[in-house]
Image: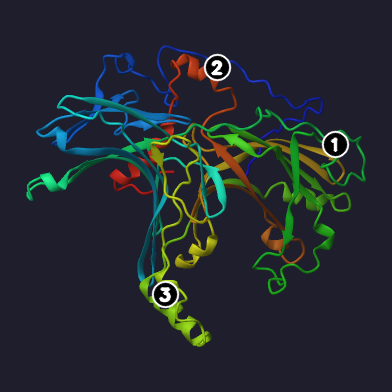
């Protein structure tokens, strides 16, 4: 529940919406929300990511960010080189480098654990080898990380590396770079494998930003003081969206069996205003404005001002492959319901659970990617969506003013989580991480049979960084995209027994 100060300040109705940002204070000691970079890591002579096999030495460049694996940001590319080592380099036929993105979801249910592994990105290149390769030859390469993926008809930003376990549901997004060397099998001893592969885990932390500069305050309604004031959605601001709260009877009231009856008069009584568009940087305050309009019942409006709750919820939705029992049931049901179906039809249990890999638009003749139909038919291999949500932050009311008799205007704010550690994302129709603002206004227990409660749930987008141009950051880093390193925290959950990292 939101509490007011002991002596609430009156609203300043001369305040207008502002997009001005104050200059941050700088100090030689970083705060807990800041990241310090070691100058030695940024040096061209710093340590590098090097992986070795019997016949290859793979170098992915300097260790810039202090992460457990090579990390990359938005519009970044993986650059490296492969040096030949070991005997008989003349037997090498080709060397390929493949970038893959995988989504793993698990759901613990009554029938056990349902698990699915979805390859949503697959991009490979072949290195142009010399006609007579020798030991010590070095071949540079690079692969651009696509900023978007299209899966099951849904186009979205390429999701970040992610891990979350919550109440029996797991969602994990991982990326890997696979370097494969193929050698001439006909000229090799049977003791040697014709292929040699090195899989390298990489981290992808793209920075995202709101499309518009932030609105520091919700401006006042511009209409005159009027006892017939009905809706603040008119003339409040072109940068603000206003939503009515839905009335409903409490489950404990005598109207519980018919929770939506006798509520027509209350449908446009309470309004919630937030900046538009609903895209906010994680860790930043989100201003909001509540309008309670009860000109015929001032006492009712005063009661509601004491029972307001605003929360930010984080929600993970996943689909996992159907369990074997469900597949068998689906196949049996299909056979019973359509006994005359063709013998060549494909039963549900035999359909591939792996959706289409990333469709590459590259014109490079040395690259290729697997393609296929982006139809949603492969959703038949998945179970229904499973949702898990948890509370992230609570809102604060700062000022309250009686605009006119029975009309209250309230200002407040709510934090968009922790700085740099939040990001909305989506992978087709299989997994999604969302954020919701939930507004609840309860009716007092002794009035539950007489006045309804109110509810509103509004999805918002959370980004890793605040609104600004990216060019300044690229210039300061010499053209190297900076990863959103705050997103790495969710991966620490995988390495510990603490499963409630938010």
On the image, the x and y values in percent for residue 196 come to: 19, 43
**Image colouring:** rainbow
Depth check, mark 2 against mark 3: the one in front is 3
**Which tag, 1 or 2, sits closer to the chain's start?**
2
Residue drawn at the location 76% of the way across and 61% of the way down: 451
Mark 3 or 1 closer to N-term?
Answer: 1
Front-most of residues 207 and 418: 207
Does 192 sit above or below residue 30? below
Tell me whether the residue at label 2 lies in contact with that at label 3, contact meaning CB atoms closer than 8 angstroms.
Answer: no
Q: Nearer the viewer, residue 99 or 34?
A: 99
Which residue matches tag 2?
24
Q: Which mark is residue 171?
A: none
Cβ atoms at labels 3 and 1 below 8 Å apart: no
The residue carrying pointer 3 sits among few (fewer than 14), some (14 to 19) or many (20 or more) residues within 10 Å by Cα, namely: some
The residue labelled by disc 3 is 326
Which residue is located at x 17 percent, y 24 percent?
Answer: 136
- Residue 486 spot, x, y in % from top left: 43, 32
In space, the residues marked 3 and 1 are separated at their CA atoms by 54 Å
Residue highlighted by disc 1: 235
Rendering quarter of residue 161 = top left
Comes first in the chain, label 2 or label 3: 2
Whole-Å distance between the Cαs marked 2 and 3? 56 Å
Q: CA distance from mark 1 to mark 2?
A: 33 Å
Q: Residue at x 46, y 54 (%)?
A: 356
Residue at 44% x, 29% y: name it.
76
SS type, badge 2: loop
Residue that protrudes farthest toward the front in the picture? 131
- Name the image quarter holding residue 2: top right
């Amino acid at each position: 529940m939101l509490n007011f100060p002991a002596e609430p300040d009156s609203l300043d109705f001369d305040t207008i919406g502002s997009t001005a940002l104050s200059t941050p204070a700088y100090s030689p000691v970083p705060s807990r929300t800041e990241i310090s970079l070691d100058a030695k890591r940024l040096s061209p002579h710093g340590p590098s990511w090097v992986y070795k096999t019997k016949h290859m030495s793979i170098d992915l460049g300097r260790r810039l960010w202090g992460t457990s694996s090579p990390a990359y940001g938005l519009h970044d590319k993986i650059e490296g080189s492969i040096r030949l080592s070991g005997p008989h380099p003349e037997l090498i036929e080709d060397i390929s480098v493949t970038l893959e993105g995988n989504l793993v979801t698990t759901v613990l249910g009554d029938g056990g654990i349902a698990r699915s592994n979805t390859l949503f990105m697959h991009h490979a290149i072949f290195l142009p080898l010399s006609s007579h390769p020798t030991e010590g030859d070095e071949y540079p390469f690079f692969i651009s990380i696509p900023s978007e993926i299209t899966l099951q008809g849904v186009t979205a930003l390429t999701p970040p590396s992610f891990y979350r376990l919550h109440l029996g549901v797991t969602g994990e997004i991982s990326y890997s770079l696979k370097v494969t060397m193929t050698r001439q099998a006909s000229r090799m001893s049977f003791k040697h494998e014709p292929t040699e592969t090195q899989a390298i885990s990489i981290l992808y932390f793209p920075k995202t930003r709101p499309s518009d500069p932030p609105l520091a305050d919700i401006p006042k309604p511009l209409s005159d003081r009027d006892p017939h004031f009905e809706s603040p959605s008119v003339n409040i601001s072109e940068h603000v969206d206003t939503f009515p709260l839905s009335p409903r009877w409490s489950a404990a009231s005598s109207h519980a069996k018919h929770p939506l009856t006798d509520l027509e008069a209350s449908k446009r009584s309470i309004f919630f205003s937030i900046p538009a568009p609903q895209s906010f940087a994680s860790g930043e305050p989100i201003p909001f404005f509540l309008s309670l309009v009860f000109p015929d019942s001032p006492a009712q409006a005063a009661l509601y001002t004491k029972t307001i709750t605003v929360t930010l919820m984080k929600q993970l939705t996943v689909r996992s492959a159907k369990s074997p029992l469900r597949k068998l049931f689906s196949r049996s049901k299909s056979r019973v319901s359509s006994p005359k179906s063709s013998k060549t039809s494909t039963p549900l249990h035999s359909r591939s659970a792996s959706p289409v890999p990333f469709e590459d638009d590259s014109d490079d003749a040395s690259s290729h990617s697997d393609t296929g139909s982006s139809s949603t038919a492969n959703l038949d291999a998945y179970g229904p969506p499973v949702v898990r949500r948890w509370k992230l932050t609570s809102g604060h009311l700062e000022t309250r003013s009686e605009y006119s008799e029975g009309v209250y205007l309230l200002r407040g704010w709510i934090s968009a989580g922790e700085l740099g550690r939040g990001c909305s994302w989506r992978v087709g129709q299989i997994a999604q991480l969302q954020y919701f603002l939930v507004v609840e206004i309860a009716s007092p227990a002794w009035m539950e049979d007489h006045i309804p409660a109110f509810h509103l749930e509004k999805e918002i987008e959370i980004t890793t960084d605040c609104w600004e141009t990216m060019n300044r950051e690229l210039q300061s880093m010499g053209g190297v995209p900076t990863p959103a390193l705050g997103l790495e925290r969710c991966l620490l959950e995988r390495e510990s027994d603490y499963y409630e990292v938010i």
